[in-house]
Image: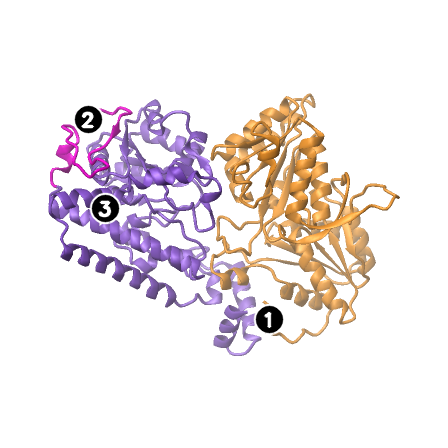
Chain colours: A orange, B purple
């Protein structure tokens, strides 16, 4: 829906999944530029743990689609070295949780190399990885660690919420000359959406107003945006007009779009899947406080995960993750409305 | 004198014949008929537990299960070599090792059902709960061993991991530390040939056992489907560690006959001929042949063993299905040792939310079913 391409001709679209959008984009970029190659665990023969690389080994061969040894620090560092010589590696880390094993190569090396080489080197490196809970994968496989990377100068961090953005942002990430952390979400892979055909390149660093409204702004990203839209539409039926801002990029952060929206609505709630303390919402709240404090009619509120290692049990995982019901409740509180009658289906 | 060379150590042939070895036989001299039969029973029972757990997963009673089918000898042989004060740092597949430690069979599946963050108390059985991040536990084992060394006790740490893990930096760093400080630790690598879909050739250009000598750690490459060789090698490694000899690396060459986990389908990437070939090296079958030739297998023994296995499976099934679900508010437990203001506030908010549905019991119940 927001591809930032100035295209006045009618663009044909297809309804495909987020997974398919990623797969098609990887394919298109492998075709577009011979310097692009993929590397990661289980991405070739196995086609990736989440099947994002389906069919790519078969069509592009083992020189372009590399099954790496089980060594995250190793293949991220090796990809970084290849990027220094002008290759365009697209790394898949099976989940963001395993990126912690590679964090030195990402934070101390990929992010800093342009600066520490005095601008004489480019690092056209993409690291794709899914985060997110809700799949009963327990504490070490369900984290939302986006803020770890969004904190680091030298990195770009994008987190698309729709198949169309998955396509346009992945294309942009692969063609970018700086390292881009491309955050996918386990619960979005099968989500469907309209995707424009042909080359689509997003501008990294631009948020999107995905629903307009005048009463309150919900700011979210990735999976959170789909829940935010769901809640906004549900409240619309009750006569509330909610605007939803999808960040799309966590670094650079599009502070202007956030502030312009809150300036209009006077109320803001951040909906995030990460932990509350020091999370993405803290930065958004500060942005709003610094930018449009005088336009606020109520304090900015955050809806985030309980500050516990995510449990495996379904009931406990549900208790820990922020839900649509939590968001709706906080939106009502911010607007000073009576709480809706709770139902057992809320959680 | 043990020859630490890359020769594959095998004491039991594929046909179930005992292969004499001057170096290794003294370490398994106690293995008379009844002792071998006990190992056999262990292997039959854990295979049955494993099969039942796989079935429970297929029936929706477990979220996930990592089968050990084919690795019974590697796990039973090594676990039965340990003393109760030795401490085990497993990966996620060492369910036969947990069985040998006396973990209640239904507790083995507790985490896989999602009913508890920890299926058992590590300090009552001296075995940590499963490590899911590949290879990390090798460092923990090394650290534990350094502690035992400082305490001047002769307990030993053993780390279990797979061929895939040997590519991780953690495993290499663990070997550096263990060698530098001569830590009493055993690195027990079950090379089951596959890291999900990646064959061992992606991890290692030579035998995995060849790596350890580069760190100054002697290594043994053993037939991991030969329970006698596994027992002998583990005893040798433990003895070295107990007597100040430092770490030993064991590569138990075995085969993951099933999927990586129940979420995997190996028929997509594995040649069925390979599986057929490894079926001829089946660890249970091989020991059965030896026991038959020794006259230990009688119809009574077969019936008793089958009854033991069935009882374990029934206990597992009943224990698994009968587990009480965790209370929703327990999500805030065990984050810190002492009360934490932020968590207490979140706990109280959530309790208020739950009671908004009615009585506390009903809300918990509804939340579970929602």
Quadrant housing the N terminus of chain B: top left
Q: Quadrant of the C terminus of chain B?
A: bottom right
Q: Are marks 3 and 1 on the same chain?
A: no
Label 3, on which residue? B85
Q: Nearer the viewer, mark 3 or mark 1?
A: 1
In the picture of the structure, the residue carrying the numbered disc 1 is: A345
Element class at badge 1: loop
Q: Earlier in the sequence, mark 3 or mark 2?
A: 2
* SS label for mark 3: loop
Question: Helix, strand or loop at disc 2?
Answer: loop
Task: Give the numbered dot on residue B2.
Answer: 2
Q: Are marks 3 and 1 in contact (CB under 8 Å)?
A: no
- B358 to A227, vertically: above or below: below
**Residue A304 appears in which quarter of the rendering?**
bottom right
Q: Is residue A143 left or right of residue B250?
A: right
Magenta stretch secondary structure, dominant: loop
Question: Residue B7 magenta-drawn?
Answer: yes
Residue nearer the viewer, B236 or A10: A10
Say few, some or many: other residues with alpha carbon within 10 Å of mark 2 (under 14 / 14 to 19 / 20 or more).
Answer: few
Visible residue check, residue A53? yes
Can you name the residue that lies furthest to the right here? A8
Q: Chain of mark 2?
A: B
Percent x, y of residue A26: 66, 37
Q: Which residues are magenta?
A: B1-30
In the rendered image, residue B151, in percent from the top left (x then y), is placed at 25, 40
Q: Give the spatial CA distance, label 3 vs label 2.
A: 25 Å
The image shows residue A24 at horizontal and vertical percentages of 68, 41
Marks 1/2: CA–CA distance:
66 Å
Name the residue at 40% across, 49% down: B66
């Amino acid at each position: 829906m927001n591809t930032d391409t100035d295209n006045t001709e009618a663009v044909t679209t297809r309804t495909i999944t987020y997974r398919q959008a990623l797969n098609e984009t990887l394919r298109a970029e492998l075709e577009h530029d011979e310097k692009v190659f993929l590397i990661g665990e289980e991405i070739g023969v196995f086609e990736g743990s989440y099947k994002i690389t389906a069919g790519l080994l078969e069509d592009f061969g083992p020189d372009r689609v590399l099954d790496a040894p089980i060594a995250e620090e190793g293949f991220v560092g090796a990809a970084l070295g290849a990027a220094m010589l002008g290759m365009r590696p697209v790394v898949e880390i099976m989940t963001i949780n395993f990126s912690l094993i590679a964090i030195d190569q990402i934070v101390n090396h990929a992010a800093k190399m342009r600066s520490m080489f005095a601008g004489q080197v480019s690092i056209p490196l993409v690291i794709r990885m899914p985060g997110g809970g809700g799949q009963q994968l327990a504490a070490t496989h369900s984290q939302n660690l986006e803020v770890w990377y969004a904190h680091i100068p030298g990195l770009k961090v994008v987190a698309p919420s729709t198949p169309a953005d998955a396509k346009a942002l992945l294309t942009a990430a692969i063609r970018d000359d700086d390292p881009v952390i491309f955050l996918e979400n386990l619960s979005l892979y099968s989500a469907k959406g309209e995707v424009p055909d042909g080359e689509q390149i997003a501008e990294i660093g631009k948020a999107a107003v995905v629903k307009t409204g005048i009463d309150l702004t919900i700011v979210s990203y990735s999976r959170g945006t789909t829940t935010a839209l769901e809640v906004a539409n549900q409240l619309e039926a009750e006569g509330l007009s909610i605007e939803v801002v999808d960040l799309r990029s966590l670094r650079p952060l599009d502070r202007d779009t956030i502030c312009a929206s809150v300036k209009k609505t006077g109320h803001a709630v951040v909906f995030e899947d990460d932990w509350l303390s020091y999370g993405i919402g803290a930065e958004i709240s500060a942005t709003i406080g610094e930018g449009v404090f005088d336009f606020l009619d109520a304090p900015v509120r955050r809806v985030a995960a309980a500050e516990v290692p995510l449990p495996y049990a379904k009931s406990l995982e549900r208790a820990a993750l922020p839900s649509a019901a939590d968001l709706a409740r906080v939106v009502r509180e911010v607007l000073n409305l009576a709480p809706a009658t709770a139902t057992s289906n809320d959680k | 004198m043990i020859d630490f060379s890359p020769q594959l150590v095998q004491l039991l042939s594929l046909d179930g014949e005992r292969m004499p070895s001057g170096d290794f036989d003294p370490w398994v001299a106690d293995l008379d008929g009844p002792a071998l039969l006990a190992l056999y029973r262990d292997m039959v029972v854990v295979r049955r537990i494993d099969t039942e757990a796989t079935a429970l997963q297929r029936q929706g009673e477990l979220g996930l299960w990592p089968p050990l089918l084919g690795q019974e000898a590697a796990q039973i042989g090594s676990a039965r070599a340990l003393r109760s004060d030795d401490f085990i740092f497993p990966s996620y597949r060492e369910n036969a090792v947990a069985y040998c430690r006396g973990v209640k069979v239904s507790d083995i599946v507790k985490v896989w059902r999602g009913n508890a963050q920890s299926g058992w108390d590590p300090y009552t059985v001296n075995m940590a709960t499963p490590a899911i991040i590949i290879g990390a536990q090798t460092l923990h084992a090394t650290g534990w061993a350094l502690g035992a060394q400082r305490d001047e006790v002769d307990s030993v740490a053993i780390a279990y991991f797979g061929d895939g893990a040997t590519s991780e930096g953690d495993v290499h760093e663990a070997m550096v530390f263990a060698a530098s400080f001569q830590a009493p630790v055993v690195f027990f690598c079950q090379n089951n040939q596959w890291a999900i879909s990646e064959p061992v050739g992606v991890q290692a250009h030579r035998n995995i056992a060849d790596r350890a000598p580069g760190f100054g750690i002697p290594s043994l490459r053993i037939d991991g489907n030969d329970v006698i060789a596994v027992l002998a090698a583990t005893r040798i490694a433990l003895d070295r560690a107990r007597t100040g000899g430092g770490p030993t690396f064991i590569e138990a060459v075995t085969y993951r006959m099933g999927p990586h986990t129940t979420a995997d389908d190996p028929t997509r990437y594995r040649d069925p001929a390979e599986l057929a070939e490894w079926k001829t090296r089946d660890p249970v079958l091989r020991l059965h042949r030896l026991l038959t030739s020794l006259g230990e297998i009688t119809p009574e023994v077969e019936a008793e063993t089958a009854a033991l296995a069935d009882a374990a499976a029934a206990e597992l099934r009943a224990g698994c299905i009968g587990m009480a679900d965790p209370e929703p508010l327990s999500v805030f437990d065990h984050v810190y040792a002492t009360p934490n203001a932020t968590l207490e506030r979140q706990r109280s908010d959530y309790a208020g939310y739950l009671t908004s549905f009615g009585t506390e019991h009903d809300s918990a119940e509804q939340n579970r079913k929602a």
